Image (cartoon, rainbow, N blue to C red):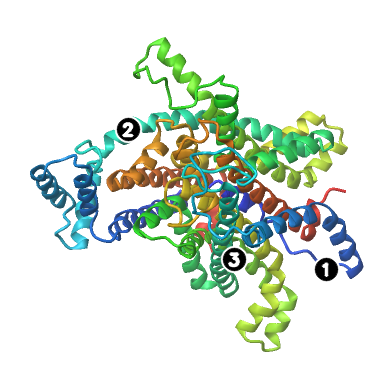
């Protein structure tokens, strides 16, 4: 999918050597003030809107009819109504919530599988690495959208959780590849050798000597997976394969397109989900880039 | 040469394997649908009253035989493979008995005509912009980089929807629906070509803009790494002209971008699915959308197969090309890891 080259671009060589706590703090605060905080604030606002909004504005049901076909925005329906006369503002809150949950689940599943496979392959090496990477390569070559379309058709009743999981299990290979490369280069570092010589078990080695040093990459990979999970959900929903019986940003767009809101000029039905998807994707990318800048001094401009 | 031959052989075997796995998925997943697909389709037919019960029974029997649904699964798979080997993708459910192959070959040219120019132009423009922004840090980088970051990260269907609304609905300067006017029939007359060109602008723009942004960002990142390389410092300190240094960087940062181009062309069929739906463009995306809505599983399967074939083939070509270009890869496949 479209996000793949970005995921590749995010992988930059070598963890940062730790040079003096004070310099690190100075460096982190320098970045924190700018893009990092900006993207974080947008994301928190979106999270609050999606998860607390329905309570704050007292809108318990996104699927209740409150007006006619595409009523324009008014004092009661702030963003007008959709094709079935349902309140768009309410849908936007629930839709954001659904999209975020699916994205988070997909990101979590993909990152967990990717880190698990990548660390084992990179650290253990040998035939296990060959086998795991062979599987990864097969999964990478088969386009995930195809598997997602076929799976979604096969699973007739798709809950939000199902959507998150199927998106997650089709998008882990890039993470696995990146993590394997990291783990493989970390394996020969001094601190790992020392821990190994002092008799630490493989499991504790991986947990205490390998994983902490890859943390920034894992976090970045998670952010990218989260973002692409949300967009993938929207793509599937617009193909008519979204979560059944719920509202997501993609499903709002699908309704808007099916019922010709764009061509009839009912902008309130399609502009809000469009803007929210763009905003979420953009702030997640910004967040990822700023994390990258914090941990990778080569990328910072003086 | 024998080493290289072995490299080619492993790659060929490798992609045959990936293709077999893909085929298996394509075959199995559709059959996981509760009940059997023929029942689903018959239920739809009888509810719409489009066929008499006699005709229905005939069609039902024909389907069961065609899919071999009365046979065990592994035999069904062999039948499926056998049909594929003859280029037979089965018949459409919703437009029975039109062969799926016909439907796809009607839609595919539209998709290719839309995507191929968008990818090529976007690739060239994006890469040039990427090198320039990386090299001339100042103003260019401050404006173009954030703009392309924003645009390329905009989900492409969002841009499609906004462009459609702005140019076709608000300003009314471009048509809003389809690949050509409603009053037209596809032919090679000038009026038809003119109409098709008008309908082409918006979907093309929404694809090419995103693609330029994505390429520019990738190329900028690659070039920034190259800028740190010794040869850049050395040639700059020797007083080599700026333009020539940019050319050096360009050539070195290019290899991954060439891969990206090949993979984009491979992903061409699936790349514009939603854009086509937004504009009701008569390509693969619109066909897939209606197939999903009408539960026309043979058409869905045919399209997913085409998408997979294109992607696998592009991946294969990239691997082979890398084998030629990069001797290190040849060495790693034959030596130790």
Give yes or no for contact between labels 2 and 3 (Cβ–Cβ under 8 Å). no
Local packing at callout 1 (Cα closer than 10 Å; few below 14, some 14-19, many 20+) is few
Residue for point 71% across, 88% down: A198
Residue position for label 3: A180
Q: Position of residue A89 (x, y in %)?
A: 60, 49
CA gap between label 2 and label 3 equals 41 Å
Question: Is residue A166 something that shows in the picture?
Answer: yes
Callout 1: residue from which chain? Answer: A
- Work out whether B37 lies above or below A268: below
Task: Give the residue at mark 2.
Answer: B105
Q: CA distance from mark 3 to mark 1?
A: 22 Å
Residue A159: image quadrant is: bottom left
**Disc 2 or disc 3, which is closer to the eye?**
2
- Whether residue B98 sits left or right of residue B55 in the image: it is right
Residue B159 to residue A15: above or below: above
Mark 2 secondary-structure assignment: helix
Residue farthest top in this picture: B190
Q: A62 or A270: nearer the eye? A: A62
Query: Compared with residue B214, is residue B18 higher up or lower down, i.e. above or below?
Result: below
Q: How many numbered marks appear?
A: 3
Residues under labels 1 and 2: Cα distance?
A: 58 Å
Q: Disc 2: which chain?
A: B
| Res. B258 in view | no
Residue A142 is labelled as: none
User: Mark 3 vs mark 1: same chain?
Assistant: yes
Q: Place residue B22 in its image quadrant.
A: bottom left
User: In terms of secondary structure, where does tag 1 sit?
Assistant: loop
Judging by the rendered image, the residue that carries numbered circle 1 is: A18
Marks 1 and 2 share the same chain: no
Category of crowding for the residue at label 3, using alpha-carbon neighbours closer than 10 angstroms: few (below 14), some (14–19), many (at least 20): many
């Amino acid at each position: 999918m479209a996000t793949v080259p970005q995921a590749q671009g995010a992988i930059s060589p070598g963890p940062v050597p730790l040079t003096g706590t004070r310099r690190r703090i100075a460096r982190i605060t320098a970045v924190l003030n700018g893009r990092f905080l900006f993207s974080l604030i947008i994301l928190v606002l979106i999270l609050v809107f999606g998860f607390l909004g329905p309570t704050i504005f007292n809108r318990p049901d996104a699927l209740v009819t409150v007006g006619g076909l595409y009523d324009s925005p008014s004092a009661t329906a702030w963003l007008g109504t959709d094709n079935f006369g349902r309140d768009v503002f309410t849908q936007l809150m629930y839709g954001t919530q659904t999209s975020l949950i699916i994205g988070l689940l997909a990101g979590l599943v993909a990152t967990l599988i990717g880190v698990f496979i990548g660390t084992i392959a990179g650290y253990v090496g040998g035939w296990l690495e060959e086998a795991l990477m062979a599987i990864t390569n097969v999964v990478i070559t088969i386009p995930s959208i195809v598997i997602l379309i076929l799976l979604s058709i096969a699973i007739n009743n798709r809950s939000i959780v199902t959507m998150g999981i199927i998106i997650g299990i089709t998008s882990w290979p890039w993470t696995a590849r990146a993590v394997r490369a990291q783990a493989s280069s970390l394996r020969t570092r001094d601190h790992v050798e020392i821990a190994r010589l002092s008799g630490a078990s493989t499991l504790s080695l991986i947990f205490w000597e390998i994983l902490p040093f890859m943390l920034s990459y894992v976090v970045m990979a998670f952010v990218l997976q989260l973002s692409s999970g949300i967009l993938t959900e929207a793509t599937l929903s617009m193909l008519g394969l979204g979560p059944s019986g719920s509202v997501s940003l993609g499903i709002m767009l699908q309704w808007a397109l099916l019922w010709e809101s764009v061509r009839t000029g009912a902008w309130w039905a399609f502009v809000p989900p469009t803007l929210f998807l763009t905003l979420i994707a953009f702030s997640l990318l910004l967040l990822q880039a700023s994390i990258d800048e914090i941990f990778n001094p080569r990328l910072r401009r003086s | 040469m024998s080493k290289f031959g072995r490299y080619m052989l492993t790659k060929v075997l490798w992609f045959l394997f990936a293709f077999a796995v893909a085929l298996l998925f394509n075959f199995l997943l559709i059959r996981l649908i509760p009940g059997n697909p023929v029942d689903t389709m018959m239920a739809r037919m009888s509810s719409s009253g489009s066929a008499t019960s006699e005709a229905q029974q005939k069609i039902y029997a024909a389907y069961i035989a065609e899919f071999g649904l009365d046979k065990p699964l592994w035999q069904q798979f062999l039948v499926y493979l056998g049909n594929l080997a003859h280029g037979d993708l089965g018949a459409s459910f919703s437009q029975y008995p039109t062969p799926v192959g016909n439907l796809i070959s009607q839609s595919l040219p539209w998709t290719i005509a839309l995507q191929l120019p968008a990818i090529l132009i976007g690739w060239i423009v994006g890469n040039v912009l990427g090198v320039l922004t990386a090299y001339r840090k100042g103003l260019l980088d401050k404006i173009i980089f954030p703009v392309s970051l924003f645009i390329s990260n905009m989900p492409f269907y969002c841009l499609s929807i906004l462009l459609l609304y702005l140019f076709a609905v608000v300003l009314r300067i471009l048509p809003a629906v389809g690949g050509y006017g409603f009053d037209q029939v596809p032919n090679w007359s000038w009026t038809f070509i003119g109409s098709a060109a008008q309908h082409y602008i918006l979907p093309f723009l929404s694809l090419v803009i995103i693609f330029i942004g994505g390429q520019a960002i990738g190329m900028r990142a690659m070039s920034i790494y190259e800028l740190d390389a010794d040869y850049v410092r050395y040639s700059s300190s020797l007083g080599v002209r700026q333009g020539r240094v940019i050319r050096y960087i360009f050539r070195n940062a290019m290899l991954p971008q060439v891969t990206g181009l090949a993979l984009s062309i491979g992903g061409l069929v699936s790349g514009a699915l939603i854009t086509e739906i937004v504009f009701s463009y008569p390509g693969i995306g619109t066909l897939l959308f209606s197939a999903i809505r009408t539960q026309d599983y043979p058409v869905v399967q045919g399209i997913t197969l085409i998408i997979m074939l294109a992607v696998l083939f592009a991946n294969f070509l990239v691997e082979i090309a890398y084998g030629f270009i990069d001797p290190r890869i040849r060495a790693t496949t034959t030596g130790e890891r």
